[in-house]
Image (cartoon, coloured by chain):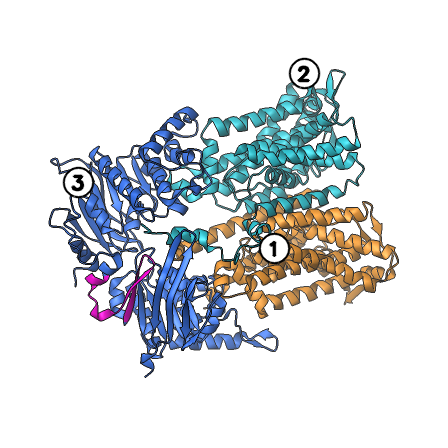
C-alpha cells in the first residue's frame, strides 16, 4: 500500500529532491549560500510568483492554460498606482484592484466553456487586452509613495535573526487556502476530475461548466493578488511589469510535477517549482561569472526533463490499462 | 472555395487601408526616390515581411493540428548568431564571405530549432503547445548567450542589404517573402505534401489507415516553420543592423498565430490557406501602421488585436454560430444528432 | 405481488435524428429483481434507447414511468437522482482519481465545511466489501484492472441508491474469471431487488445471467421474451431479421466456380492479439471472396485489422504470396498490395474536410510518395472514371466528402482502395448504413473484382449478403474463429446462424 502511495507522490518527491540537491550544491560551493536568510529571500523575492503559480496550478490541473497572468499583474499594478496617484484611499483602491483579475477570468472562462474555444487562444487575447489596457492608462512608470504601500513594502517580520516580508505571509495564506480548496472541497475534486477526463466528469453529473469558469476566475484573482504583492515589491505601476511571467508560472507548475494535460499534480509542488526557479537565479547570482540568461536556459532544460518524463510515464501508464482506451 | 475564404480577409485589409486614405490622402501614393519605391504601402509590405514569413511557416504547422510557440525565440537566435558571425568575420575579411557565413549560421541554427520541435512532437509525441514551449523559454536564453546579453551593433553594409536593401527598386525583403511563399506554394500544390498535411491534420487515424506516414510530415512542417523564422530573424536583425537577444521577435508567435487564424485556417487543423495567412499578416501590419499614422495611441494596438482574436475565434466556433447567430435552434447543447447519424443511421434501407 | 408491476416502463418511445428514425414505438419493461438483456445488432437502437432513458437524448414521443409514476428525464444528473444509473463499457470514471473519489465525487461527504475523507474511506470500503472486493481504496483507479474499475463504477452507481442499473457491455474487456466475479455481483444485486439492464454481445453470458430479454432491430421493437424459452438460433434470427426463410431461393450463387487450385494470396498462422482475438489461421486464395460472419464484437474487425497491420499482432505469422512478412503499419500492408476499408467510415475512413478527389487519390498518392505527385489532369481523369464507374453522386470531384450520403462516401472509399489495385481487399461492413441500391452495386462490384483476380475479405452483419457473394465463410464467435464453411448449395443462413450461436439450439 505504502509503495503505491509513494508512487503517486513520485513527481513531487523528485521536485523536492531536486530543490534540495540544488540548494546543497550552492551551500557547498558558495559561502553564505546556506544562510537561512537565503531561503527566506527566495520567498520574499518570489511571493508574487508563488501566488500566480497557485492559480495556474488549478488551471493546468483542469487541462487548461492561462497566458493572461503576467499582463493582469501589470494591469493591477497600473490601476493601483494610477488610483493612488489620484489620491484615492487604499481602502477603495485595493478591492478595485482585486476585482480586475476575477472579472477578466469570468469572461475568459465563459468564452472557453460556452463557445468551446481553446483556453490557449482565449487567454492569449486576455493577455493582449490586459497589457493594452495598462498601456492605455499610461506608458510611463507611476511611482507609489502612499504610506500604506511603503509600510507593506518595507515592514520586516523578524524570525530570530532573520526576517520575511508581509507579502510572504500573504503567499503562505494563499498556499494553505489553495491546498484546502484542492483537497477538502467539492470544487477542488471537480477540478481534478475534469482534468482527468472531462467527458466522464460530465457523465458523472459534475458541474463542469461552472467549475471551469470558476477556475479561470480563481486564477484571475490570484493574478490580481499577485499584482498587488508585486506592486508592494516594486512600489510602482508599469505596463511592462511581469512581462513573460506567464512562462515562469507555467514552468514552475510543470517543474512542480503537475501534468500539463491535467488531472495530476499538487499545489505544494508548484510552490517548490517556484523555489527551484528562485534557487537557479540565486545560484547564478552567487556564481557571479554566469549571466542571467542561463536562468532561461536552465528553466528550459528542466522543462524538457519534466515534460519528457511525464510523457514517458504516461505512455507506460496507458499500455498498462490499454484495454480501456481501445474500446 | 479558396476565393470565398480569401474574400473577407481581403475586404478587411482594404477597409483598413481605406481608413488610412481618409486621414492621409497621399496614403496610396507610391514614388520612386533614389531608384527606390517609397510610400506607405511599400512600407507596410516591407515591415510586414518577417511576420508574413513566419505566418507562412505557422500555417503549415497549424494545418497539422499543431502550433509553434518557438518562432519568436528562433527569430532572436537567428538574428543573434548572424550578427555575431558578421562581427567576428569582419575582423579578418571585408568581402561578402562574412555575409554568407552569417546566413548559413542563422539558417543552420533555425533548422536545428525546427528539427528539435519536430522531433519532440512527432517522435516523442508531446503535445505541440507543450513541446514548443520549451524552446520559447530556453531559446531566448540561448539568443542572449550568443550575444552575451548585449545589443550588438553591426557596421557592415552587405548585411543591412537583407532587410534594408533594394533590388530593382523593390525592397529585398519582399523578394525573400516571395521566394519562401513560392517554395511553400510549390511544395503544397505541386507535390503531394499539401494533401498529406491536410489529411493528417483533419483526420490522423484515417490518414494512418490510408498509409500516410504522418511522423515525417509533422517533422517537416516544424522544420519549415523554423526555417521561416530563421529568415525572418535575419531580416529583422539586418533591418536594425544589430542583434538583440532579449527583444527581437518578441510576441511574434502570437502575431503569427493571429495572422493564420485571420487568414481562414482553423486551429483545429486540416484545410489551410497560405495566401490567407499572408494577407492576415498584412492586416496586422497595416493595423499597426494605421494606429500610428492616424494618431491613436499605439498602445491600443494590443486591445484591437485582442478583440480581433476573439471575434475570429467566435466566428469559427460551431457553438457560437448555433447559439448566437442562429438562436432559434432547439436545445443547442444536445449536439448529438450529427454524430449519431453515423452511429444510428444504419440499415435504413 | 410486486412482480406483476414493472418498476420501470418505457412505452412508445420514438426518436428521430435528422434523416434517420433511430427508434420507432419501442417499449421496455423492467421488473424488480430481474436481469433484462437488451438485444440487437449494430444500429438496432439499443444505445439510443439507453441514452433516452438516462437523459442524454430527449425523446420525441412516448412515456417513461418509474414506480407507476410518469417521469421526464432530461439530463444524466436527473436520471441519477431518480435512481437510474449507467455503467458504460469504457468505464466512464476518472482514472487519475482514487477509488474513493470515483465512488463519491459529486456527492462527497462534507463535515464542518470540508470533505470528510476518513468517513468516505470507511464507507467506500464498506460498499466494496459488500461486493466481496477487498482493495485499497486510496489508490488511483487507473492502477487497477478494468474488471475492478467496472466494479467501482457499479459501486458508484449503487451509492446513489440506484433502482435501475444499466450495464452497457460490461464484459467486453474482461477475462473469464473477471466475468464470473461480475456475475456474482449481479446476482447479489438482483437478490436485493434491483432491476438490471444487461447489454452484451456474448450469447453465453446472456443465457447465463439474464431472465428476460427485449430484442430491437432497425429501431423497432421485435419482442420481449423469457431468455430460457427462446432458443439461441431463434434469438439470432430475430436480431438479424430473417425468420426461418428458406434462403435457398436467395442463394442464386453468383460465385465463380473454383478453377482448380489457385495461388494463395495471404496466409495467417496462429495470428493473435491478446484481448482482441484468439489465435486463428486463415488462407485467402486469388480471386476468391471470403466472408467473415459473426455478431458485432465477435472479433471480426479485430481479425481484419491484424491482417492490415492497423493493429500489431502479439504472435503468429503472416505470409503474403508465400513470403513471410511483418505488417507493423498500414503503410507496410499497402506496400504488399493489401487494402482495408474500416467499418468506422466517419472516424477511420473519410477525411471530411477534403474533396472527393483528394479522398480518392489519398492511398495511391501515399504509396507513390510526396514528390511523385499525380498531375492534376491525371487525377481528374482517374477520379472522373471512378465517379462514373461507381455511380457516385454528386459527380463533382471537388465536392467535400462530408457533404455526401453514406453510400456515396463508401463508394469514394472503395475507389480509394481500388486505385491502388490491391491483391487483397479487406472490406469491413462496407454496406452498413447505405441504401439498398448502393448496396447491390457494391456487391456486384465485389463479384466482378474477384472474377478479375482480386481476393476479397468481406465482413458483414447481413448473412444474406455474405451468402450471395462469398465462396467460403469463416465464422467467429466470442473473439475466436470457430469454423470455416464452403458456400455450396445446401448451405443456408440457418447453418451460419447455428455456427454463430455455437452449434446449440
The x, y position of residue A262, in whole percent, is 54, 56
Closer to the camera, B90 or C131?
C131
Residue identifier under label 2? B168
Identify the chain of the residue marked 1, using the numbered disc in the image: A
Pointer 3 and pointer 1 on the same chain = no
Tell me: C448 left or right of A266. left
Colour blue maps to chain: C
Residue identifier under label 1? A253
Snapshot quadrant of residue B242 = top right
Magenta-span inclusion, residue B74: no
Circle 1 residues within 10 Å: few <14, some 14–19, many ≥20: many
> What segment is highlighted magenta in the picture?
C212-235
Dot 1: what SS? helix
Identify the chain of the residue marked 2, using the numbered disc in the image: B
Question: Do we see residue A42 in this rendering?
Answer: no
Image hue for chain B: cyan
Residue identifier under label 3? C255
Circle 3 residues within 10 Å: few <14, some 14–19, many ≥20: many
Colour orange maps to chain: A
The x, y position of residue A21, in whole percent, is 60, 55
Q: Is residue C201 above or below residue A119?
A: below
Q: Mark 3 vs mark 1: give the one in front.
A: 3
Q: Quadrant of the C terminus of chain C?
A: bottom left
Return the residue found at the far bottom.
C1
Amino acid at each position: 500500500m505504502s509503495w503505491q502511495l509513494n508512487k503517486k507522490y513520485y513527481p513531487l518527491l523528485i521536485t523536492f529532491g531536486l530543490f534540495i540537491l540544488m540548494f546543497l550544491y550552492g551551500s557547498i560551493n558558495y559561502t553564505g549560500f546556506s544562510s537561512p536568510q537565503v531561503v527566506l529571500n527566495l520567498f520574499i523575492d518570489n511571493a508574487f510568483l508563488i501566488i500566480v503559480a497557485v492559480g495556474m496550478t488549478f488551471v493546468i490541473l483542469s487541462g487548461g492554460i492561462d497566458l493572461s497572468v503576467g499582463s493582469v499583474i501589470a494591469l493591477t499594478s497600473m490601476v493601483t498606482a494610477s488610483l493612488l496617484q489620484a489620491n484615492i484611499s487604499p481602502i477603495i483602491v485595493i478591492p478595485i484592484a482585486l476585482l480586475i483579475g476575477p472579472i477578466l477570468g469570468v469572461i475568459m472562462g465563459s468564452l472557453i466553456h460556452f463557445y468551446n474555444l481553446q483556453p490557449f487562444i482565449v487567454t492569449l487575447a486576455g493577455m493582449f487586452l490586459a497589457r493594452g489596457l495598462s498601456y492605455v492608462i499610461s506608458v510611463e512608470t507611476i511611482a507609489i509613495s502612499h504610506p500604506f504601500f511603503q509600510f507593506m513594502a518595507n515592514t520586516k517580520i523578524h524570525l530570530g535573526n532573520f526576517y520575511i516580508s508581509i507579502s510572504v505571509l500573504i503567499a503562505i495564506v494563499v498556499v494553505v487556502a489553495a491546498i484546502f480548496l484542492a483537497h477538502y472541497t467539492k470544487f477542488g475534486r471537480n477540478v481534478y476530475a475534469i482534468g482527468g477526463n472531462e467527458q466522464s466528469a460530465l457523465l458523472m453529473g459534475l458541474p463542469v461548466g461552472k467549475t471551469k469558469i470558476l477556475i479561470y476566475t480563481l486564477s484571475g484573482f490570484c493574478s490580481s493578488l499577485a499584482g498587488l504583492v508585486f506592486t508592494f515589491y516594486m512600489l510602482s505601476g508599469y505596463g511592462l511589469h511581469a512581462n513573460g511571467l506567464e512562462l515562469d508560472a507555467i514552468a514552475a507548475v510543470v517543474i512542480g510535477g503537475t501534468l500539463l494535460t491535467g488531472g495530476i499534480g499538487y499545489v505544494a509542488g508548484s510552490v517548490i517549482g517556484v523555489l527551484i526557479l528562485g534557487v537557479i537565479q540565486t545560484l547564478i547570482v552567487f556564481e557571479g561569472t554566469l549571466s542571467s540568461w542561463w536562468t532561461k536556459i536552465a528553466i528550459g532544460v528542466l522543462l524538457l526533463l519534466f515534460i519528457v518524463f511525464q510523457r514517458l510515464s504516461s505512455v507506460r501508464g496507458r499500455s498498462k490499462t490499454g484495454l480501456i482506451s481501445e474500446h | 472555395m479558396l476565393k470565398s475564404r480569401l474574400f473577407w480577409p481581403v475586404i478587411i485589409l482594404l477597409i483598413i487601408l481605406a481608413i488610412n486614405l481618409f486621414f492621409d490622402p497621399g496614403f496610396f501614393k507610391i514614388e520612386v526616390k533614389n531608384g527606390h519605391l517609397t510610400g506607405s504601402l511599400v512600407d507596410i509590405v516591407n515591415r510586414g515581411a518577417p511576420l508574413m514569413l513566419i505566418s507562412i511557416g505557422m500555417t503549415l504547422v497549424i494545418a497539422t493540428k499543431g502550433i509553434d510557440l518557438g518562432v519568436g525565440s528562433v527569430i532572436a537566435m537567428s538574428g543573434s548568431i548572424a550578427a555575431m558571425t558578421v562581427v567576428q568575420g569582419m575582423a579578418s575579411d571585408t568581402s561578402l564571405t562574412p555575409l554568407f557565413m552569417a546566413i548559413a549560421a542563422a539558417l543552420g541554427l533555425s533548422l536545428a530549432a525546427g528539427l528539435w520541435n519536430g522531433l519532440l512532437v512527432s517522435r516523442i509525441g508531446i503535445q505541440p503547445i507543450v513541446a514548443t514551449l520549451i524552446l520559447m523559454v530556453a531559446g531566448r536564453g540561448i539568443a542572449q548567450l550568443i550575444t552575451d546579453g548585449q545589443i550588438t551593433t553591426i557596421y557592415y553594409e552587405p548585411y543591412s542589404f537583407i532587410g534594408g536593401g533594394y533590388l530593382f527598386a523593390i525592397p529585398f525583403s519582399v523578394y525573400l517573402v516571395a521566394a519562401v511563399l513560392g517554395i511553400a506554394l510549390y511544395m503544397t500544390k505541386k507535390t503531394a505534401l499539401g494533401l498529406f498535411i491536410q489529411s493528417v491534420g483533419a483526420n490522423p487515424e484515417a490518414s494512418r489507415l490510408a498509409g500516410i506516414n504522418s511522423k515525417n510530415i509533422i517533422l517537416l512542417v516544424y522544420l519549415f516553420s523554423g526555417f521561416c523564422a530563421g529568415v525572418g530573424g535575419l531580416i529583422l536583425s539586418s533591418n536594425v543592423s544589430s542583434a538583440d537577444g532579449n527583444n527581437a521577435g518578441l510576441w511574434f508567435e502570437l502575431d503569427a498565430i493571429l495572422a493564420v487564424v485571420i487568414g481562414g485556417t482553423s486551429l483545429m487543423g486540416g484545410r489551410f490557406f497560405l495566401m490567407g495567412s499572408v494577407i492576415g499578416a498584412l492586416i496586422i501590419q497595416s493595423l499597426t501602421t494605421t494606429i500610428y499614422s492616424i494618431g491613436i495611441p499605439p498602445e491600443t494596438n494590443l486591445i484591437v488585436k485582442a478583440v480581433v482574436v476573439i471575434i475570429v475565434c467566435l466566428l469559427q466556433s460551431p457553438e457560437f454560430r448555433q447559439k448566437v447567430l442562429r438562436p432559434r435552434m432547439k436545445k443547442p447543447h444536445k449536439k448529438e444528432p450529427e454524430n449519431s447519424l453515423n452511429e444510428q443511421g444504419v440499415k435504413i434501407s | 405481488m410486486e412482480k406483476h408491476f414493472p418498476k420501470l416502463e418505457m412505452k412508445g418511445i420514438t426518436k428521430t435524428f435528422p434523416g434517420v428514425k433511430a427508434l420507432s414505438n419501442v417499449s421496455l419493461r423492467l421488473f424488480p429483481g430481474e436481469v433484462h438483456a437488451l438485444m440487437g445488432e449494430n444500429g438496432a437502437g439499443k444505445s439510443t434507447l439507453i441514452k433516452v432513458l438516462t437523459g442524454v437524448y430527449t425523446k420525441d414521443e412516448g412515456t417513461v414511468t418509474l414506480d407507476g409514476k410518469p417521469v421526464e428525464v432530461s439530463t444524466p444528473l436527473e436520471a441519477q437522482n431518480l435512481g437510474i444509473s449507467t455503467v458504460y463499457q469504457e468505464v466512464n470514471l476518472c482514472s487519475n482519481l482514487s477509488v474513493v473519489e470515483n465512488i463519491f465525487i459529486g456527492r462527497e461527504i462534507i463535515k464542518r465545511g470540508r470533505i470528510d475523507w476518513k468517513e468516505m474511506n470507511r464507507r467506500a470500503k464498506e460498499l466494496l466489501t459488500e461486493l466481496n472486493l477487498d482493495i485499497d481504496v486510496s489508490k488511483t483507479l487507473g492502477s487497477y484492472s478494468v474488471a475492478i474499475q467496472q466494479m467501482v463504477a457499479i459501486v458508484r452507481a449503487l451509492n446513489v441508491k440506484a433502482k435501475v442499473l444499466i450495464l452497457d457491455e460490461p464484459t467486453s474487456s474482461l477475462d473469464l474469471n473477471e466475468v464470473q466475479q461480475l456475475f456474482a455481483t449481479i446476482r447479489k444485486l438482483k437478490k436485493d431487488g434491483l432491476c438490471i439492464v444487461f447489454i452484451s454481445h456474448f450469447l453465453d453470458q446472456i443465457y447465463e445471467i439474464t431472465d428476460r430479454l427485449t430484442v430491437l432491430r432497425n429501431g423497432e421493437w421485435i419482442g420481449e421474451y423469457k431468455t430460457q424459452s427462446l432458443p439461441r438460433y431463434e434469438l439470432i434470427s430475430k436480431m438479424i431479421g430473417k425468420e426461418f426463410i428458406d434462403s435457398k431461393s436467395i442463394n442464386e450463387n453468383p460465385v465463380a466456380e473454383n478453377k482448380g487450385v489457385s495461388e494463395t494470396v495471404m496466409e495467417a498462422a496462429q495470428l493473435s492479439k491478446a484481448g482482441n482475438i484468439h489465435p486463428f489461421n486463415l488462407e485467402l486464395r486469388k480471386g476468391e471472396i471470403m466472408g467473415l460472419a459473426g455478431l458485432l464484437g465477435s472479433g471480426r474487425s479485430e481479425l481484419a485489422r491484424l491482417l492490415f497491420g492497423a493493429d500489431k499482432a502479439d504472435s503468429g505469422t503472416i505470409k503474403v504470396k508465400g513470403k513471410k512478412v511483418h505488417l507493423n503499419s498500414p503503410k507496410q500492408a499497402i506496400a504488399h498490395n493489401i487494402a482495408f476499408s474500416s467499418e468506422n467510415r466517419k472516424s477511420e475512413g473519410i477525411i471530411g474536410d477534403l474533396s472527393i478527389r483528394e479522398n480518392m487519390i489519398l492511398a495511391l498518392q501515399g504509396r507513390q510518395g510526396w514528390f511523385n505527385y499525380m498531375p492534376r489532369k491525371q487525377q481528374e481523369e482517374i477520379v472522373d472514371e471512378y465517379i462514373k464507374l461507381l455511380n457516385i453522386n454528386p459527380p463533382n470531384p471537388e465536392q467535400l466528402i462530408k457533404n455526401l450520403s453514406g453510400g456515396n462516401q463508401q463508394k469514394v472509399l472503395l475507389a480509394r482502395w481500388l486505385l491502388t489495385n490491391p491483391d487483397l481487399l479487406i472490406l469491413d461492413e462496407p454496406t452498413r448504413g447505405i441504401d439498398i441500391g448502393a448496396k447491390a452495386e457494391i456487391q456486384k462490384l465485389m463479384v466482378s473484382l474477384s472474377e478479375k483476380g482480386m481476393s476479397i475479405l468481406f465482413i458483414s452483419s447481413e448473412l444474406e449478403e455474405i451468402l450471395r457473394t462469398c465462396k467460403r465463410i469463416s465464422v467467429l464467435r466470442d473473439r475466436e474463429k470457430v469454423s470455416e464453411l464452403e458456400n455450396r448449395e445446401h448451405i443456408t443462413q440457418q447453418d451460419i446462424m447455428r455456427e454463430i450461436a455455437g452449434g446449440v439450439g
